[in-house]
Image: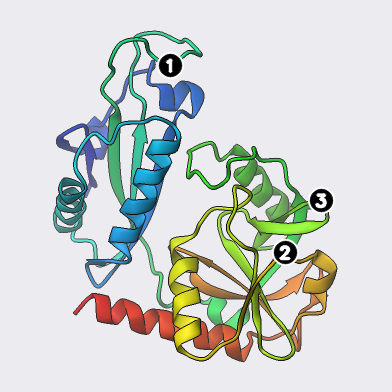
Amino acid sequence: MQRQVYVDGQYLKESEAKISVFDRGFLFADAVYEVTSVIDGHLVDFSDHILRLQRSCRELSLSLPVAPGELKKIHDELIDKNNLKEGAIYLQISRGNAGDRDFLFPSTEVKPTLVLFTQARSLVNNPKVATGLHVVTTEEIRWHRRDIKTVSLLAASLAKEYAHAKHADDAFFVEDGFITEGSSCNCYLVLHDDTVVTRPLSNAILPGITRQSLLRLAEQDGIKLEERSFTPEEAYHAKEIFLSSATQFVLPVVTLDGKSIGDGKPGRITLRLREIYLDMIKQQGK
Protein backbone atom coordinates (compact mmCIF):
# COMPACT_ATOMS: atom_id res chain seq x y z
CA MET A 1 0.00 0.00 0.00
CA GLN A 2 1.30 3.46 -0.92
CA ARG A 3 2.04 5.98 1.77
CA GLN A 4 -0.14 9.01 2.15
CA VAL A 5 1.98 12.16 2.08
CA TYR A 6 1.18 15.83 2.61
CA VAL A 7 1.93 18.53 0.03
CA ASP A 8 0.65 22.08 0.47
CA GLY A 9 -2.69 21.32 2.04
CA GLN A 10 -3.38 17.99 0.33
CA TYR A 11 -3.02 14.39 1.46
CA LEU A 12 -1.93 12.38 -1.56
CA LYS A 13 -0.62 8.97 -2.54
CA GLU A 14 3.16 9.24 -2.71
CA SER A 15 3.07 8.52 -6.47
CA GLU A 16 0.81 11.55 -6.98
CA ALA A 17 2.87 14.02 -4.93
CA LYS A 18 4.65 16.69 -6.98
CA ILE A 19 6.40 20.04 -6.57
CA SER A 20 7.57 22.52 -9.21
CA VAL A 21 10.95 22.21 -10.91
CA PHE A 22 11.35 25.88 -9.96
CA ASP A 23 10.95 25.22 -6.25
CA ARG A 24 13.87 26.89 -4.46
CA GLY A 25 14.32 23.90 -2.19
CA PHE A 26 15.13 21.84 -5.28
CA LEU A 27 17.27 24.50 -6.99
CA PHE A 28 19.14 26.10 -4.09
CA ALA A 29 18.54 23.91 -0.99
CA ASP A 30 16.65 27.00 0.17
CA ALA A 31 14.67 25.02 2.70
CA VAL A 32 14.63 23.75 6.27
CA TYR A 33 13.45 20.47 7.74
CA GLU A 34 12.68 18.53 10.89
CA VAL A 35 12.44 14.81 11.64
CA THR A 36 10.24 13.79 14.56
CA SER A 37 10.25 10.23 15.89
CA VAL A 38 7.06 8.27 16.41
CA ILE A 39 6.87 5.58 19.10
CA ASP A 40 3.67 3.62 19.74
CA GLY A 41 1.86 6.06 17.44
CA HIS A 42 2.94 9.10 19.48
CA LEU A 43 5.26 11.96 18.51
CA VAL A 44 8.48 12.38 20.52
CA ASP A 45 9.57 15.86 21.68
CA PHE A 46 7.25 17.43 19.10
CA SER A 47 6.95 20.89 20.66
CA ASP A 48 10.75 21.24 20.81
CA HIS A 49 11.09 20.22 17.16
CA ILE A 50 8.58 22.91 16.17
CA LEU A 51 10.40 25.54 18.22
CA ARG A 52 13.63 24.67 16.40
CA LEU A 53 11.78 24.73 13.06
CA GLN A 54 10.51 28.23 13.81
CA ARG A 55 14.03 29.36 14.68
CA SER A 56 15.43 27.89 11.44
CA CYS A 57 12.74 29.73 9.48
CA ARG A 58 13.52 33.02 11.21
CA GLU A 59 17.24 32.68 10.50
CA LEU A 60 16.51 32.33 6.76
CA SER A 61 13.61 34.82 6.64
CA LEU A 62 11.26 31.97 5.73
CA SER A 63 7.58 32.12 6.53
CA LEU A 64 5.94 29.27 8.40
CA PRO A 65 3.04 28.44 6.03
CA VAL A 66 0.74 27.10 8.77
CA ALA A 67 0.48 27.62 12.52
CA PRO A 68 2.26 25.21 14.90
CA GLY A 69 -1.10 23.80 16.04
CA GLU A 70 -2.00 22.97 12.46
CA LEU A 71 1.39 21.28 11.98
CA LYS A 72 0.57 19.03 14.94
CA LYS A 73 -2.76 18.10 13.32
CA ILE A 74 -1.01 17.27 10.04
CA HIS A 75 1.50 15.05 11.83
CA ASP A 76 -1.29 13.24 13.70
CA GLU A 77 -3.29 12.81 10.49
CA LEU A 78 -0.31 11.26 8.70
CA ILE A 79 0.24 8.88 11.62
CA ASP A 80 -3.40 7.83 11.36
CA LYS A 81 -3.57 7.59 7.55
CA ASN A 82 -0.40 5.48 7.40
CA ASN A 83 -1.09 3.49 10.58
CA LEU A 84 2.40 4.46 11.75
CA LYS A 85 3.31 2.79 15.03
CA GLU A 86 7.08 3.34 15.01
CA GLY A 87 9.29 5.43 12.78
CA ALA A 88 9.51 9.10 11.90
CA ILE A 89 7.81 11.99 10.14
CA TYR A 90 9.89 14.18 7.85
CA LEU A 91 8.81 17.81 7.40
CA GLN A 92 10.29 20.25 4.90
CA ILE A 93 9.56 23.92 4.22
CA SER A 94 11.10 25.61 1.19
CA ARG A 95 10.85 29.23 0.07
CA GLY A 96 8.62 27.95 -2.71
CA ASN A 97 8.25 28.36 -6.46
CA ALA A 98 9.47 31.76 -7.65
CA GLY A 99 8.63 30.99 -11.29
CA ASP A 100 12.22 30.76 -12.51
CA ARG A 101 15.78 30.21 -11.31
CA ASP A 102 17.26 33.31 -9.67
CA PHE A 103 19.78 33.50 -6.81
CA LEU A 104 18.00 36.50 -5.31
CA PHE A 105 15.07 35.89 -3.00
CA PRO A 106 11.73 36.48 -4.76
CA SER A 107 10.84 40.19 -4.91
CA THR A 108 7.14 39.39 -4.66
CA GLU A 109 5.42 37.22 -2.08
CA VAL A 110 5.76 33.50 -2.82
CA LYS A 111 3.93 30.79 -0.94
CA PRO A 112 6.35 28.43 0.85
CA THR A 113 6.19 24.75 -0.06
CA LEU A 114 5.28 22.44 2.83
CA VAL A 115 5.90 18.70 2.50
CA LEU A 116 5.58 15.92 5.08
CA PHE A 117 5.89 12.14 4.82
CA THR A 118 6.21 9.15 7.13
CA GLN A 119 9.01 6.58 7.37
CA ALA A 120 8.19 3.31 9.12
CA ARG A 121 11.24 1.79 10.84
CA SER A 122 12.30 0.11 14.07
CA LEU A 123 13.83 2.63 16.45
CA VAL A 124 13.65 1.14 19.94
CA ASN A 125 15.06 -2.31 19.16
CA ASN A 126 18.17 -1.13 17.34
CA PRO A 127 20.75 -3.96 17.15
CA LYS A 128 23.56 -1.40 17.36
CA VAL A 129 22.68 -0.85 21.03
CA ALA A 130 24.23 -4.25 21.80
CA THR A 131 27.14 -4.18 19.34
CA GLY A 132 28.02 -0.50 19.29
CA LEU A 133 28.99 1.65 16.32
CA HIS A 134 32.26 1.92 14.45
CA VAL A 135 32.98 5.56 13.59
CA VAL A 136 35.69 7.36 11.62
CA THR A 137 36.69 11.03 11.60
CA THR A 138 36.63 13.19 8.49
CA GLU A 139 37.35 16.81 7.60
CA GLU A 140 34.62 19.34 8.35
CA ILE A 141 33.54 20.77 4.97
CA ARG A 142 30.10 22.17 5.82
CA TRP A 143 29.10 25.82 5.88
CA HIS A 144 29.34 27.93 9.05
CA ARG A 145 25.64 27.99 10.01
CA ARG A 146 25.20 24.40 11.08
CA ASP A 147 22.85 25.61 13.81
CA ILE A 148 20.19 26.06 11.09
CA LYS A 149 18.59 22.77 10.08
CA THR A 150 18.70 23.23 6.31
CA VAL A 151 18.28 20.57 3.62
CA SER A 152 21.80 21.24 2.33
CA LEU A 153 23.04 17.79 3.33
CA LEU A 154 25.50 16.88 0.58
CA ALA A 155 28.48 17.15 2.95
CA ALA A 156 26.72 14.88 5.42
CA SER A 157 25.98 12.41 2.64
CA LEU A 158 29.63 12.47 1.54
CA ALA A 159 30.70 11.82 5.14
CA LYS A 160 28.39 8.83 5.39
CA GLU A 161 29.67 7.50 2.08
CA TYR A 162 33.25 7.93 3.35
CA ALA A 163 32.38 5.98 6.49
CA HIS A 164 30.73 3.26 4.43
CA ALA A 165 33.84 2.96 2.25
CA LYS A 166 35.88 2.52 5.44
CA HIS A 167 33.48 -0.23 6.64
CA ALA A 168 32.31 2.05 9.44
CA ASP A 169 28.83 3.02 10.58
CA ASP A 170 29.20 6.79 10.70
CA ALA A 171 31.61 9.72 10.67
CA PHE A 172 32.48 12.55 13.06
CA PHE A 173 33.52 15.88 11.55
CA VAL A 174 36.78 17.50 12.69
CA GLU A 175 37.48 21.23 12.38
CA ASP A 176 40.59 23.06 13.63
CA GLY A 177 41.61 19.92 15.49
CA PHE A 178 38.31 19.49 17.36
CA ILE A 179 35.35 17.21 16.78
CA THR A 180 32.26 19.23 15.93
CA GLU A 181 29.50 16.61 15.59
CA GLY A 182 28.54 13.54 13.61
CA SER A 183 27.23 13.45 10.05
CA SER A 184 23.66 13.53 11.40
CA CYS A 185 24.06 13.44 15.17
CA ASN A 186 25.56 15.10 18.23
CA CYS A 187 28.45 13.31 19.92
CA TYR A 188 29.71 12.85 23.48
CA LEU A 189 32.61 11.48 25.53
CA VAL A 190 32.41 9.81 28.92
CA LEU A 191 35.55 10.47 30.93
CA HIS A 192 37.04 7.97 33.37
CA ASP A 193 35.33 9.74 36.28
CA ASP A 194 31.98 9.23 34.43
CA THR A 195 31.64 12.88 33.44
CA VAL A 196 29.80 13.32 30.13
CA VAL A 197 31.46 15.83 27.80
CA THR A 198 29.78 17.37 24.76
CA ARG A 199 30.51 20.39 22.62
CA PRO A 200 28.65 23.58 23.63
CA LEU A 201 26.02 25.08 21.36
CA SER A 202 27.20 27.55 18.72
CA ASN A 203 26.83 28.00 14.97
CA ALA A 204 29.30 25.07 14.61
CA ILE A 205 26.75 22.39 15.57
CA LEU A 206 23.06 21.69 15.36
CA PRO A 207 21.17 22.24 18.63
CA GLY A 208 19.92 18.66 18.83
CA ILE A 209 16.50 18.12 20.36
CA THR A 210 17.57 14.72 21.70
CA ARG A 211 20.75 16.38 23.02
CA GLN A 212 18.63 18.93 24.86
CA SER A 213 16.53 16.25 26.51
CA LEU A 214 19.55 14.09 27.32
CA LEU A 215 21.42 16.84 29.13
CA ARG A 216 18.34 17.57 31.25
CA LEU A 217 17.80 13.88 32.02
CA ALA A 218 21.48 13.32 32.82
CA GLU A 219 21.45 16.18 35.31
CA GLN A 220 18.30 14.81 36.94
CA ASP A 221 19.98 11.39 37.17
CA GLY A 222 23.05 12.82 38.90
CA ILE A 223 25.39 12.37 35.93
CA LYS A 224 28.11 15.02 35.75
CA LEU A 225 28.17 17.17 32.61
CA GLU A 226 30.79 19.32 30.94
CA GLU A 227 30.17 21.36 27.78
CA ARG A 228 33.47 22.01 25.98
CA SER A 229 35.32 21.12 22.80
CA PHE A 230 37.39 17.96 22.57
CA THR A 231 39.92 16.49 20.14
CA PRO A 232 39.96 13.10 18.43
CA GLU A 233 43.01 12.25 20.56
CA GLU A 234 41.03 12.82 23.77
CA ALA A 235 38.19 10.79 22.32
CA TYR A 236 40.50 7.83 21.59
CA HIS A 237 41.28 7.63 25.32
CA ALA A 238 37.74 8.18 26.61
CA LYS A 239 35.99 5.61 28.77
CA GLU A 240 32.94 5.73 26.46
CA ILE A 241 31.73 7.55 23.36
CA PHE A 242 28.13 7.84 22.27
CA LEU A 243 25.98 9.81 19.88
CA SER A 244 22.41 11.05 19.87
CA SER A 245 19.81 11.97 17.28
CA ALA A 246 16.04 12.05 16.89
CA THR A 247 15.81 8.59 15.31
CA GLN A 248 18.82 6.88 16.92
CA PHE A 249 18.11 8.20 20.44
CA VAL A 250 21.40 7.20 22.15
CA LEU A 251 23.85 4.77 20.57
CA PRO A 252 27.28 3.62 21.83
CA VAL A 253 30.46 4.02 19.79
CA VAL A 254 32.95 1.20 20.37
CA THR A 255 35.71 2.20 17.92
CA LEU A 256 36.89 5.54 16.55
CA ASP A 257 39.29 5.51 13.59
CA GLY A 258 39.87 1.83 14.28
CA LYS A 259 40.87 2.42 17.91
CA SER A 260 38.91 0.57 20.57
CA ILE A 261 37.11 2.84 23.02
CA GLY A 262 37.26 1.72 26.66
CA ASP A 263 36.84 -2.03 26.78
CA GLY A 264 35.39 -2.07 23.26
CA LYS A 265 31.84 -2.64 24.49
CA PRO A 266 28.82 -0.36 24.99
CA GLY A 267 29.39 1.51 28.24
CA ARG A 268 27.34 1.78 31.41
CA ILE A 269 26.69 5.54 31.23
CA THR A 270 25.67 5.32 27.57
CA LEU A 271 23.20 2.53 28.22
CA ARG A 272 21.83 4.34 31.26
CA LEU A 273 21.18 7.47 29.23
CA ARG A 274 19.41 5.47 26.54
CA GLU A 275 17.31 3.82 29.24
CA ILE A 276 16.18 7.06 30.85
CA TYR A 277 15.53 8.64 27.45
CA LEU A 278 13.26 5.75 26.47
CA ASP A 279 11.53 6.06 29.85
CA MET A 280 10.86 9.72 29.04
CA ILE A 281 9.33 8.72 25.69
CA LYS A 282 7.00 6.28 27.44
CA GLN A 283 5.86 9.04 29.78
CA GLN A 284 5.21 11.38 26.83
CA GLY A 285 3.01 8.71 25.23
CA LYS A 286 0.75 8.28 28.26
- Count all numbered tags in the image, as a single digit: 3
Identified by mark 3, the residue type is Asp
Left or right: residue 112 compared with residue 177:
left
The residue singled out by tag 2 in the image is: 229
Which quarter of the figure has residue 261? bottom right
- Which element type, helix, strand or loop, lies under badge 1? loop
The residue singled out by tag 3 in the image is: 176
Which quarter of the figure has residue 286? bottom left
Q: Is residue 182 visible?
A: yes
In the rendered image of this protein, does residue 16 appear above or below residue 259?
A: above
The residue singled out by tag 1 in the image is: 105
Identified by mark 2, the residue type is Ser
Camera-side residue of 183 and 158: 183
Instruction: Classify 10 Å Cα crowding around label 1: few (below 14), some (14-19), many (20 and above).
Output: few
Which quarter of the figure has residue 23? top left
Q: Position of residue 143 (x, y in %)?
A: 64, 37
Earlier residue among tags 2 and 3: 3
Q: Residue at x 45, y 10 (%)?
A: 101
In the rendered image of this protein, does residue 15 appear above or below residue 224?
A: above
Left or right: residue 249 compared with residue 155:
left
